[in-house]
Image (cartoon, rainbow, N blue to C red):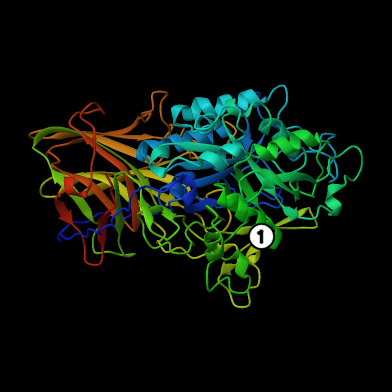
Amino acid sequence: MRIRSAVLLLVSAFVVVPHAAQADPYPRYNEVYGVATHNSYWLNRSDRADFFASGTQEILSDQLLHERVRALELDIHSEGAPAGRWKVYHTSDSEDFTCRYLDDCLQMLRNFQYAVPRHEVVNVMIELKNVVPHTGATFPGIPTNANFNDSHTIEQFDDTVRQVLGTSLYTPADFLSRCTPGSTMVSCMASAGWPTVDQLRGKFIVNLIGNWSTAGADWVRYATHDVPHRAAFPMQSVFEVDPTCRASWLTPANSRVAATGIQVHGLDAAGRATDPYCVRDISDFDPSPPIDTTARQAAFQASVFWQLEDIGPNGTGKAAVFLRHNGVVRGADSFDHRPGCNSYPWQCQENRIDAGYQFLQTDYPWHVVGNTDPSQRVLRRDGVPVREPGARLHVHTGQTPTYWPFVHDTVPATSRRWWETTVSTTRNGDTWGKVTTAGVFVTDVLKTCPAPGLDKQDSCTNYARPAQDGGDGSLRAASADNSSWIQIGRQKNTVPGPSFYQENVSLYIRVARHGTVHDTRLNAPRYGTCRDGQDPNSDGVSWTCIGNMIAFAVDNRGNGATVRVYSAGRLTTTGVPDWQEIAAEEFDTPLTNQGLSALGDVLYAGSRRGTGLWPDASLREITLADLPGRGIPPGATVTDLSVR
């Protein structure tokens, strides 16, 4: 843990970075691009049974806020999960994840939405991922357990998504409502296109993908099961394209399994589904049970999203036609940009952007071409950012500033104020990967890129981050002479290397009374929004549902003050933080300077202030203009990234 002492604030300076003008009109959803993280839930906590696993290794809220990601991926399993719930993991359900159940991951998205209510649309790509053969055998070649069954139905999956995301969900029915009744998803896409990005603000689009073993059959069931009433958009997998339909993968290995590819009718130049070619849509690692060919072709026509793994000329050629008719594509992993990717140019992020793909899929959202503007989330094709509305302040200091920046308002000695914010920082520490050899041995490895002689991006496990580790953001209230003060802060603590402490979020309450300082620390849950009895390695983790949302209420009474400190790890059913009181402190002097104080690189999102001791109708978002008091050391900056 890193607890640093706050010292007297002496100098006042600040920086406001102007934004480029927003061009009008707003582009359509398919006319912008942004970052999509792969296996967004995954952390390397050194689980030796998590075969072939990899992922982003950063908590979801920091991907969305600090790294500005607008597309996530979650792998779900019905195996071993309670009826009507889905576990989230890659291969092993032991510990390499940040949220145990799908509904808990979706709750984290609600937390993000509270901080940024008018966010650009966020895609949540959910992959069906059961891994255990239905016979219980441990060797490949046998279809896995069904992802949808009597205790985990398609309707229960949709209900989970709808119950958590509610009216924030943009559905296939919303998409089809703009087209002639009876249109397929693809024909609607070609004729009507997409809404503009401002029309989709505050929304989530859930995509469902299934391309491995029985997941292939389950995905076809979903994509052809009354699509207008589904919660998720089907997402077509394109592993390989054969324009001649002569590939060996069109023939099943035997009568008990499906072929890994089919003939489809893609769009021609006029947008009609009359172009015949063949697509391998199922992984060749483990087989799928037989799938009705007509249903499989109908699923293709229900997919306005593609996961494109074929980055050769056949795949990219068909994708180009799909894109011209308003399709949306997430390409295969693209971890690097020039010059680091010159030896494998098609994997360069620049080439994916030039090809028109909307999602740059990566494990390293901090290593993206052009990622220099901390206010950008999605960009137009010309590279101009679309400005996302919301209240955001970004603090940057060196590793050892002479004192912590403090931007604040001065309130009366008799007053009541409620302050709240969501704190976000970049990942801490190197990102260690896993290597699986002989299908049974899992080893933790570290390879930092770009590296001399690198010829394949899959060898990399770690890219440098432009933001510095150790960001520490807090709310602070201090007396006029700074002799007494209190901070409620959020920081991340990580043990070097792969361990269960990856991305550990800690809260601290630091109190000073006339020169005497004391600290209290609480560790937030590591496997969800609240601690669960199944959570491993959680000694010392709070049973209170706390997290990235922090708040305090300051009751100044002229000759003294009471401060009550709160945190929330989730929202209530009414959509407000489930604030939990974690401390109460008395002072013999009013604390009249109140605001934000930070160390390192810290983003504050959705900061709000009210004139009571609990959030009420007086609660308002605040920007830097609402914090006229300045205490900023040389070399540090406080940047207002807010957009109204």
Dot 1 alpha-carbon crowd within 10 angstroms: few under 14, some 14 to 19, many 20 or more: some
Query: Where residue 77 sits: x, y (%)?
Result: 67, 35
Q: Is residue 110 left or right of residue 21?
A: right
> Relative to residue 448, is residue 235 depicted above or below?
above
Question: Quick one: 33 or 563, which is closer to the camera?
Answer: 33
- The structure residue drawn at horizontal position 25% and vertical position 48%, both measured from the top left corner, is 596
Query: Where residue 613 sits: x, y (%)?
Result: 22, 28
Query: Where residue 381 sits: x, y (%)?
Result: 45, 58
Q: Is residue 511 left or right of residue 557?
A: right
Q: Disc 1 designates what residue?
A: 311
Q: Is residue 130 left or right of residue 122?
A: right
- The structure residue drawn at horizontal position 74% and vertical position 44%, both measured from the top left corner, is 264
Query: Where residue 463 sits: x, y (%)?
Result: 52, 64
> Relative to residue 473, is residue 574 depicted above or below?
above
Image quadrant of residue 421? top left
Question: Quick one: 290 or 440, which is closer to the camera?
Answer: 290
- The structure residue drawn at horizontal position 21% and vertical position 63%, both measured from the top left corner, is 633
Q: Secondary structure at mark 1?
A: loop
